[in-house]
Amino acid sequence: MIWAVRFETLLAGLAALVLGLGGPIAASRGQDAPAAKPEMRENCPGLVASDTPRIIQAALRLAVLGADQARITYSGHSTFLIESPQLVRIATDYNDYVRPPLLPDIATMNHAHSTHFTDRPDPGIQFVLRGWAGGEAPARHDLQYKDVRVRNVPTNIRDWGGGTERHGNSIFIFELANLCIAHLGHLHHTLTQQQLDEIGHIDVVMVPVDGSYTLDLEGMIEVLQALKAPLMMPMHYFSSYTLNRFVSRLGADWDVEYAETPSIVVSKATLPAKPKILVLPGH
């Protein structure tokens, strides 16, 4: 009986401690995370929204990067954390559902779906770059911050009525560590020569491979062949079936590597001689 009383007292104390810690944390976030959207749930039942980001140990290692190195960590869906030699942190398609484990200095967004943007970015983010401007006007960004340059190339998207929203998406290009890294966002069409010229030479490209919400598989392959990036990182694939469909279609011509961790360090010296698809673990 004495043991039971003490055990209940211990449990009550622990509960009070948890509630005491949870209160200010919840208050600082303002409100609960939204429910997962259908775009994220389809073929991906394990992806559930949470206001606590997954802790990715590899991204939390603050090892010094060389002047020619960039660290890329896949947080999930279409969000990557990119870190420069001066530890400038960039989050792509920053949103309310999947966020990187570290607060970025720069956040880029697109708005084809709410899983690619937020109206409530963390106030600690110094630069929030939206890939659309509204009213069919193109968003234009060319930001230089420390050792990072961020610029964009606008593209069109389908609207909910079946028409076209001009300049509703942006391909963001990140120049750092002597590398050019492109994030295609929610790309819905192949690229014109003018857009390819604006993008320029690309070393690493982050490419949506779902084949339905974004551009179809054959169209996305055409885009990759035009970009000629030596390193391609799939994203926005929902399930192993969708990912494998993309990989099997291209694996005959390009090398394929499955990374063991969601974080890698890349440089010009480590880029593959033959085009490679690098799959980072995530959703």
Image (spheres, rainbow, N blue to C red):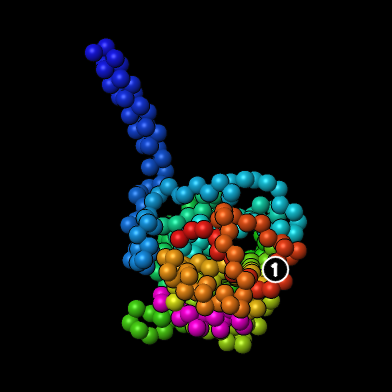
Tell me if residue 272 comes above or below residue 53 in the rendering.
below
State the image coordinates of residue 8 (x, y, percent, origin top left).
28, 21
- In the picture, measured across the screen, residue 134 lies left or right of residue 176, that is left
Asked whether 218 falls inside the magenta stretch, the response is: yes
Tell which residue pokes out farthest to the left in this image.
1
| Image label count | 1
What is the chief secondary structure element of the magenta stretch?
helix
Under circle 1, the secondary element is: loop
Front in this rendered view, residue 137 or 259: 259
State the image coordinates of residue 23 (x, y, percent, origin top left).
36, 37
Front in this rendered view, residue 237 or 173: 237
Tell me if residue 222 comes above or below residue 83 in the rendering.
below
The quarter holding residue 279 reads: bottom right
Type of amino acid under label 1? Pro
Residue 182 appears in view: no
Front in this rendered view, residue 106 or 72: 72
The range drawn in magenta is 212-226
Residue 227 appears in view: yes
Tell me if residue 212 comes above or below residue 43 in the rendering.
below
Residue plotted at (56% across, 46% down): 57
Residue plotted at (35% across, 63% down): 41
State the image coordinates of residue 273 (x, y, percent, origin top left).
72, 71
Q: Quadrant of the C terminus?
A: bottom left
State the image coordinates of residue 182 (x, y, percent, origin top left).
60, 70
Residue plotted at (71% across, 58% down): 69
For disc 1, the neighbor class at 10 Å (few under 14, some 14 to 19, many from 20) is some
Asked whether 113 falls inside the magenta stretch, the response is: no
Residue holding disc 1:
272
